[in-house]
Image (cartoon, helix red, strand yellow):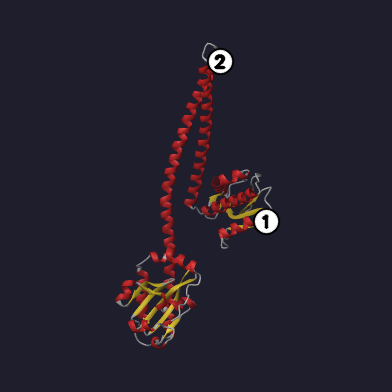
Amino acid sequence: MDRIDVLGDKSERLELFSKELLAETNDTELQEIVKKAAAELNSPIALVSLVLDQVQFFKAHIGLPPVLASSRGTHRDVSFCQFVVRDGETFEVTDAANDPRIPQHVVKEYNIQAYLGIPIKVNETVMGSLCVLDTKKRSFSKEERSSLEKLAKLVNIRLKAITKNRRQTQLDLTEATLKPALSELSNALNTIQGFISKSMLAETSIKTFLNHANHLFSDHSQYSEAIRLSLEAAIKANQLNEELFLEIEFAANDSADCVNALEQIVLNIDSTPLSEIIVAAQDLSRNATKLTGGFALPDFKSDPMIYTKGNLVIAVITNCLLLISSELGKKDSTCGINLECNEHTEFVKLVFSANDLGKSESKRVADNLQELIGSERPALQVDSNSETISLQFKTRNTNT
């Protein structure tokens, strides 16, 4: 039999398989569904079969020959379920021995004579089938088809729950891992900042002493030239140390700001004050924006709540600043990035602009942002108007 490409969009299907469905091996709910399918259609075998690129995987099963039950799958080319995935619709076989579509060695080896399979889906993508198989020739009544279709809907619900639970588990694991790490990093930065403060106090005392000593020795010519030169060198070294401590302090403060911004992303809050979001995005994009003139925070008439996941909004605004900085960098511009905040009753519009940002650059930035967030975000809109980029978020004023 010729090889049939049943996958369609491979990347989407394989991503669903690898990250969610195949991580679950034994599922009691699906097992109950296949038992019910076998009983209601009076069939010795019933399966929830997931069709991958090269194999079909038995997510749940009853009545399989021992060799298939232990392997939990077969090569895709010998499966009946590949046709369900290929066509995206119910597939029926009433006489497998005389059906040219069916690989005959499967019929002979396992004595499969009849088959009925209903598509099962995850996110509207056909992933496999709920099916029954029989060892005798038979057709399936309208009532039996309807019964299997109802059970397939239960499979769809369960598969959706599995993928959702798996994603949530991954998010919980990520949060459980990152939050302690961020806390440790924050504590370390606090220690560093405390050390810097103490060191700068000591530096001030040393500077005062050196200044007094230098003044004293400059008024007494009897002191050797060597001592005077040593004092001048010590004063210069102290100045360098002072500058170094200031640089370290700035770096530590920037790192602390980034930790705060990352904590906002990890928390993933449904509603977040706009000022916190803007500050977090400013911190995360600072290294890029400072090369093109910086990004100053706007004046807020109030501090509205943004009713979109905080991590998404921070990511969008951060990427907006990075993309604008990239466009300005191509022109060697240091004009800086401006932000105007227009607050309305139910939404807030953030308008980003730069003196050297043209219409074509603005459109590229907006297109890249739209690709980032997708088209199904009713609480978040992106557009480019003339030489500006606008982001619109659903809000509710904190005073209401």
Looking at the picture, how far across and down is residue 321, in whole percent? Answer: 59, 50
Label 2 packing within 10 angstroms: few (<14), some (14-19), many (20+): few
Q: Which residue is mark 1?
A: 360
Residue 349: which numbered mark, if any?
none
Closer to the camera in the image, 43 or 324: 324
State which mark lies toward you, 2 or 1: 2
Quadrant in which the N terminus appears: bottom left
Looking at the picture, how far across and down is residue 400, in whole percent? Answer: 57, 50
Which residue corresponds to the image point at 53% horizontal and 35% vertical from the top-left? 247
Q: Amino acid at mark 2?
A: Ser
* Extreme residue toward the top, this view: 222
Label 1 packing within 10 angstroms: few (<14), some (14-19), many (20+): few
Closer to the camera in the image, 244 or 316: 244
Closer to the camera in the image, 129 or 355: 355
Q: Quadrant of residue 334?
A: top right
Q: Locate residue 292 relative to residue 47 in the image: left or right.
A: right
Q: Locate residue 333 relative to residue 307 in the image: left or right.
A: right
Q: Secondary structure at mark 2?
A: helix
- Work out whether 370 lies above or below 81: above
* Extreme residue toward the left, this view: 66
Looking at the picture, how far across and down is residue 240, in whole percent? Answer: 53, 30
**Label 1 near label 2: C-beta < 8 Å?**
no
Q: Is residue 297 visible?
A: no
Residue 218: which numbered mark, if any?
2
- Work out whether 386 lies above or below 17: above
Earlier residue among tags 2 and 1? 2
Looking at the picture, how far across and down is residue 49, in whole percent? Answer: 40, 74
Q: Amino acid at mark 1?
A: Ser
Which residue corresponds to the image point at 44% horizontal and 77% vertical from the top-left? 82
- Work out whether 323 lies above or below 154: above
